[in-house]
């Protein structure tokens, strides 16, 4: 990591006003990191007390690798280099990283997107609209980052990167001459201050449903974490290019009243159901038509009415399109024509309702749906697709539930699938150090509670490759097979090991085997050893 200004630690603290009782030395800092393994000579190491480990334990390794100063939260730390105690190291590292790179977000128009489901699609819709409007724009999502046309393989999995990486990317965007950036903000990223110094101009929410309660504890705490994106609008510095400062909120979601109460400034409400909210700028959809190849609707907002056509499938994507229109056309004043072109150009996001077609007689889909609501929406969308095709086909769903995560989801997702799919196949999805049999047992109980019968309407197949292969073997012409939960992800966690895994490769492998044609080999997972 190369610093933007190579400032001293004292200068960084002075420019951020982070409270501390420790003496701040005038040591030149060449980088900032939370990972002792990435420390290089001249770095500032920030020790974080996490859920599974404590960064203070790695201070000796950080110093050995060249750290010249350490920040932490503990009072008494023996350290051969200057140690600065702060109340919240995560908040501190966000602001120090921003200062280190010269506060790049203050030179950019920053649109933040949060929500349980639909974040990545909405963020990419906004990005495409900005590009069509001629704005030099970048995007940081949980799939990748794009800077001036260059796509970076971030490996972020499904969370926002740590603050030093966020600020490094923003710095690169500023240096490349970009003017706008779309930043996807997860609940973990917000709760852990990873985007605390991103100077948001527009905050967008898709929805807030059941998810990540293993980390946040309660729905209210999870919702509060999402709400930080909106309260952060109050802290955005004055920018030479202007400060739109607008909150784009989903009127159809139960979180609307809570979120709208967090921000006293400009609010834009969007809806698929009602014509608007009195006294607030409103945006809504009418004449909605799901199509086999996408969807169409009419968008109506303050001072405009225009038609929208999108290759995205599923009625839920009408809501995502409205959120994108609210952030661009309404909040930023982007021309309607740019919104129309941008939405039409948005062909899909990797691992989001992605069709896998090797010439088979049925539809095969890979989707990221990993929450009860997302799974419900995905299965309902596939039901709509079957009805549009005549309604004779069956819906076969393959998915699991992660270990060491929200336990309640297991039964909830199985209940959803038992109600909507003709055949549900429960399988591995990052079991980590938990018993996979135990996870599948919880899911089986959920399905049984909705009248499911094991061996008839649902199956438990531990190996994910075997589960996808079985689903493909069961499929008849006109059916839909959908594998949910992994989407674009490139690994699966068993124990403490990440094994290479891609649902799209697995689906292609299963299809090729079924069709008797050349195709990729089924990726290996430890479950194969016992199958």
Image (cartoon, helix red, strand yellow):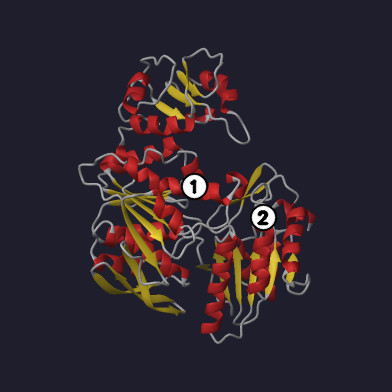
Find residue 377 and report its horizontal and vertical position in percent.
Answer: 54, 68
Quadrant position of residue 176: top left
The N terminus - image quarter: top left
- Compared with 69, 461 (above or below) is below
State left or right for residue 46 relative to residue 325. right
Name the residue tied to disc 2: 408
Q: Residue furthest left?
A: 240
- Front residue of 502/370: it is 370
Closest to the observer, 321 or 139: 321
**For the image shown, how many numbered marks are present on the structure?**
2
**Direction front: furthest residue:** 278
Q: Nearer the viewer, residue 349 or 184?
A: 184
At 65% from the left and 69% from the top, the residue drawn is: 417
Secondary structure under the numbered disc 2 in the rendered image? helix
What residue did someone put label 1 on? 224
Task: Say whether disc 2 or disc 1 marks the residue closer to the N-terminus.
Answer: 1
Q: Which quadrant of the rendered structure holds the C terminus?
A: bottom right
| Secondary structure under the numbered disc 1 in the rendered image | helix
Q: Residue at x 59, y 80 (%)?
A: 361
Q: Residue at horizontal 36%, vertical 57%? A: 248
User: Above or below — where is 148 with respect to 40?
Assistant: below
Q: Position of residue 214 (x, y in %)?
A: 62, 47
CA gap, disc 2 and disc 1: 20 Å
How far from the left and from the top, in percent, is residue 472?
66, 72
């Amino acid at each position: 990591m190369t610093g933007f200004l190579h400032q001293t630690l004292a200068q960084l603290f002075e420019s951020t006003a982070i409270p501390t009782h420790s003496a701040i030395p005038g040591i030149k800092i060449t980088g900032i990191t939370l990972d002792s393994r990435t420390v290089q000579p001249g770095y500032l190491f920030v020790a974080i007390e996490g859920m599974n480990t404590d960064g203070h334990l790695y201070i000796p390794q950080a110093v050995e690798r060249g750290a010249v100063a350490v920040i932490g939260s503990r009072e008494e730390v023996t350290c051969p280099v200057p140690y600065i105690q702060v109340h919240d190291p995560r908040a501190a590292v966000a602001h120090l990283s921003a200062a280190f790179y010269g506060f790049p977000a203050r030179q950019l128009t920053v649109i933040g997107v949060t929500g349980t489901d639909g974040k990545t699609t909405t963020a990419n819709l906004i990005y495409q609209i900005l590009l069509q409007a001629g704005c030099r724009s970048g995007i940081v999502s949980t799939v990748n980052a794009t800077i001036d046309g260059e796509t970076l393989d971030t490996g972020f999995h499904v969370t926002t990167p740590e603050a030093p990486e966020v600020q490094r990317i923003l710095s690169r965007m500023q240096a490349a001459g970009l003017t706008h950036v779309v930043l996807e903000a997860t609940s973990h990223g917000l709760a852990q201050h990873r985007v605390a110094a991103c100077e948001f101009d527009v905050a967008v929410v898709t929805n807030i449903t059941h998810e990540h309660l293993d980390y946040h504890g309660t729905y209210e705490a999870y919702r509060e974490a999402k709400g930080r994106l909106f309260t952060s609008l109050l802290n955005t510095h004055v920018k030479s290019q202007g400060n739109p400062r607008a909150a784009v909120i989903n009127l159809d979601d139960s979180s609307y009243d809570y979120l709208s109460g967090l921000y006293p400034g400009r609010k834009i409400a969007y809806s698929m159901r009602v014509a608007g909210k009195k006294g607030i700028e409103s945006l809504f959809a009418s004449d909605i038509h799901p199509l086999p190849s996408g969807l169409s609707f009419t968008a109506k907002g303050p001072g405009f009415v225009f038609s929208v056509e999108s290759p995205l499938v599923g009625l839920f994507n009408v809501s995502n399109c409205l959120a994108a229109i609210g952030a661009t056309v309404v909040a930023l004043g982007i021309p309607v024509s740019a919104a129309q072109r941008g939405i039409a150009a948005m062909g899909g996001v990797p691992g989001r309702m992605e069709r896998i077609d090797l010439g088979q007689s049925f539809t095969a889909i890979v989707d990221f749906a990993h929450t009860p609501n997302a799974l419900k929406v995905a299965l309902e969308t596939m039901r709509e697709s079957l009805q549009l095709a005549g309604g004779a086909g069956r819906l076969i769903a393959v998915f699991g539930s992660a270990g060491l995560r929200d336990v309640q989801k297991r039964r909830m997702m199985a209940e959803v699938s038992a109600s909507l799919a003709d055949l549900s196949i429960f399988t591995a999805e990052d079991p980590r150090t938990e018993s996979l049999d135990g996870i599948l047992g919880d899911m089986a109980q959920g399905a049984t509670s909705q009248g499911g019968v094991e061996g008839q309407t649902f199956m438990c197949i531990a190996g994910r490759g075997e589960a996808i292969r079985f689903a493909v073997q069961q499929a008849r012409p006109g059916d839909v097979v959908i594998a949910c939960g992994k989407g674009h992800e490139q690994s699966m966690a068993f124990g403490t090991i990440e094994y290479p895994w891609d649902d799209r490769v697995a689906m292609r492998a299963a299809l090729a085997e079924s069709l008797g044609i050349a195709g990729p080999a089924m990726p290996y997972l430890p479950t194969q050893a016992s199958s």
